[in-house]
Image (cartoon, rainbow, N blue to C red):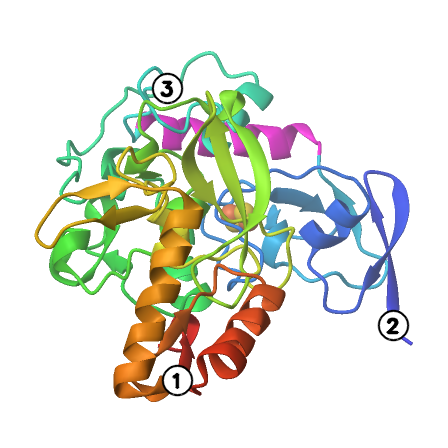
Amino acid sequence: MEKKIPITIDGREVEAAAGQMILEAARENGIFIPTLCHYPGTTKVGACRVCVVDVEGARSLVASCCMPVSPGMVVRTDTKKVRDAQRLIVELLWASGDHNCLTCEQNGNCDLQNLVYWLELETPRFSIQFPKYKPETTNTMISRDLNKCILCGRCIRACNEIQVNEVLDFSKRGSRAKVGPAFDADYIDSECFFCGECADVCPVGAITFRQSRFKGRPWEMQKVKTTCTYCGVGCQMDLNINNGKIVKVTGNRDYAQPNGGSLCIKGRFGLDFVNNPDRLKKPLIRKEKGGELTEASWDEALELIAKKFGEIKKKDGADSIAGLSSARCTNEENYLFQKFMRAVVGTNNVDHCARL
Ligand code: FES
């Protein structure tokens, strides 16, 4: 049986699992502690210190995200000392970035913005000074504005530990520290796979999805859970829909299997075909050699295919025909397809796009 450790948080006696961090124990018991750099499933780095708490007997405030519980520990999450420290940290972050919510894509979905509001801050005590980096818009999928970066490192850990792409890291030191691919390259000139994990985990507006820029605010999006149709893995994802159109695709960590909220470039960004005016919705037939493709009914198209298949089979044999099916079909449809190829056409030449 799992060993339980009794601790007290804000006067409440709770039980924590051995090895659990204070933050996790508090969250499990419905006690709110703010975080910025913490991201479940990645290394605990204790970089931002926003999660500080008062632990009886400790020399100073401790970061709850990386302090394990111990028997009899007495923790307070809401003392004046804790709030003063959180206010100072948030004000410093606010003052050192270009956090202009009016134009920020993350407005309404920003952890820093939420913290400023939660701590009831009107304005930072410090003058706002940020490095004036040129925002990166050199690819069509991900925008980066490092003037908004709070150096929490979530993107780096997501890139290295969740997707294991190992593209992002910190470079330089102190006030010149920044996050990005090797040699400070733009994403498009780097080894980036464009999985979009960095944008998904960014707590502020530093890394955002370029495709959805100006296409809808977070509160306008209707989220629809679906299964990615690109391959046979069956990744779960949320379509973000505004005005009846898919605006972006986000992962959802609540859907544990099979992808745990992560997506690849196709699932994440390959969505423009859905509303593309060139998308084929009816069969097209070229009635004369070299002529134009014209719309036809399904009966007409299927009749033509059957006739052509018959002619090919008669002339060159059934093995001159091959069938390629799709991961977008259901198992039942794929079963029927292979059955059709084997039993009706008479060939074993059957393959599937998910295997390629
Ligand atoms: Fe704990 Fe950042 S959330 S140090």
Please tell me whether residue 339 is drawn above or below residue 190 in the rendered image: below
Residue 23 in the image: state x and y as whole percent.
68, 50
Instruction: Please name the amino acid that badge 3 sits on.
Output: Cys
Residue 133 seen in this snapshot: yes
Cα distance in 3D space between marks 3 and 2: 46 Å
Q: Mark on residue 3?
A: 2
Quarter of the image with the N terminus is bottom right
Name which of mark 2 and mark 1 comes first in the sequence. 2
Q: Nearer the viewer, mark 3 or mark 2?
A: 3
Instruction: Please name the amino acid that badge 1 sits on.
Output: Asn
Magenta-highlighted residues: 78-95
Count of labels shown?
Answer: 3
Residue 66 in the image: state x and y as whole percent.
59, 58
Quarter of the image with the C terminus is bottom left
Which is nearer the eye, 282 or 257? 282
Residue name at image x 39 percent, y 42 percent:
297
Q: Secondary structure at mark 3?
A: loop
Q: Mark on residue 101?
A: 3
Q: Nearer the viewer, mark 2 or mark 1?
A: 1
